[in-house]
Amino acid sequence: MFAHKVGVTKEQVLEALRGVMDPELHRSIVELNMVKDIGIQDGSVRVDALLTISGCPMRETIIDSIKAKVKELPGVAHVDVNLGVMTQEQRQALVGQLRPGPQKQSPLLSPTSTTRVIVVASGKGGVGKSTVTTNLAIAMAKRGRIAGIADADVYGFSIPHMLGVQGKPTIIDQMIIPLEREGVRVISMGFMVDENEAVIWRGPMLHKAVTTFLGEVYWGDTQELLIDLPPGTGDVSLSIAQTLPRAEMLIVTTPQPAAASVAYRAARMAEKVNMPVIGVVENMSFYVAAPGAPPSYIFGQGGGARLAEMIGAPLLGQIPLDPEIREGGDRGQPVTLTAPDSPSARVFYKIADALLGRTRQ
């Protein structure tokens, strides 16, 4: 295209662009066939690239990443990036590449999936199940794992607020790209409706929402997927058990006997659908009024240990009643992110380490 001979070649530029990752798909833009053309003239490089959709929210991030990588090459003085948009056929080819096979089925649903699915359950509401889910996901990400959260509490979604994530997911030819924060990929009904909107659905719609989160969301190379269940043992729990037969359950309870007794029903449901229970987490275990002060057992003692003994699963941790946890959730700043060395955050990291040290059933 250009007659002048320069020090850098198209091949070198293309090789450099292999290091540019699509920020949503986490794959090289070269591998995804997003590089349309490269032009070189007198130390100036022009890169024509294709966005997956018009109005891509990561447009500026992609431009900056391309410029940064190409400018690292010797002899490159200036980089221009022109962005176009994939055609429908190109998008279909992209989805087929990410989801090979005649049905374009999500790899998460395949028996050979390498993603570990941990269902976070409780028998009743108000025990801090979403708080545990959010902080465990952050802890796993900080341990170097690729973590995700599917907020299956369709009526009472709170994960977006607790994780501090806002926005609408990108949709590529009916494939939904989860939003992300601090290395945690997340999907929730909270991204689909207004925060104050009531979701009034019957069972079949709930089932469709859950299967969409699992089958149509691009989880990619996610290693640990935490699913925040609604309280109880209803339709959503059964849908997940049917859709992901290799899922495992983590039960959250509080120390009081009544909560542990109700949580036992979640364990019984897991047993009936052949879902192994990998552990129990006791939340709001005690309160320490001041450093060095004796703990106060506001909600009683021993509920988590009794539940663990009843179902034959380990008690993985006892999380204190800590205002920092509540305040962090209200601000969208999980305590495992903002105060990782605090006593409560250390318990979350201990639980995450225990889960990551386990082998899949």
Image: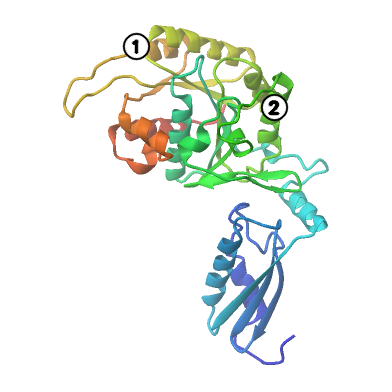
Q: Amino acid at mark 1?
A: Gly
Residue at 43% from the left image edge and 39% from the top image edge = 332
The quarter of the picture where residue 6 lies is: bottom right
Q: Taking the image as drawn, is residue 87 in sight?
A: yes
Cβ atoms at labels 1 and 2 below 8 Å apart:
no
Q: Which mark is residue 243?
A: 2
The image position of residue 304, as x and y in percent, is 39, 15
Of all residues, the one furthest to the left in this rendering is: 292
The image position of residue 119, as x and y in percent, is 56, 26
> Where 2 falls versus 66 (above or below)?
below
The foreground one among 120 and 317 is: 120
Of all residues, the one furthest to the front in this rendering is: 196
> Which residue is under mark 1?
302
- Counting labels gives 2
Residue at 34% from the left image edge and 30% from the top image edge = 347
Residue at 64% from the left image edge and 38% from the top image edge = 192
The image position of residue 181, as x and y in percent, is 50, 46
Q: Is residue 339 left or right of residue 162?
A: left
Q: Is residue 289 left or right of residue 21?
A: left
Residue at 70% from the left image edge and 36% from the top image edge = 215
The image position of residue 59, as x and y in percent, is 61, 61
Q: Amino acid at mark 2?
A: Thr
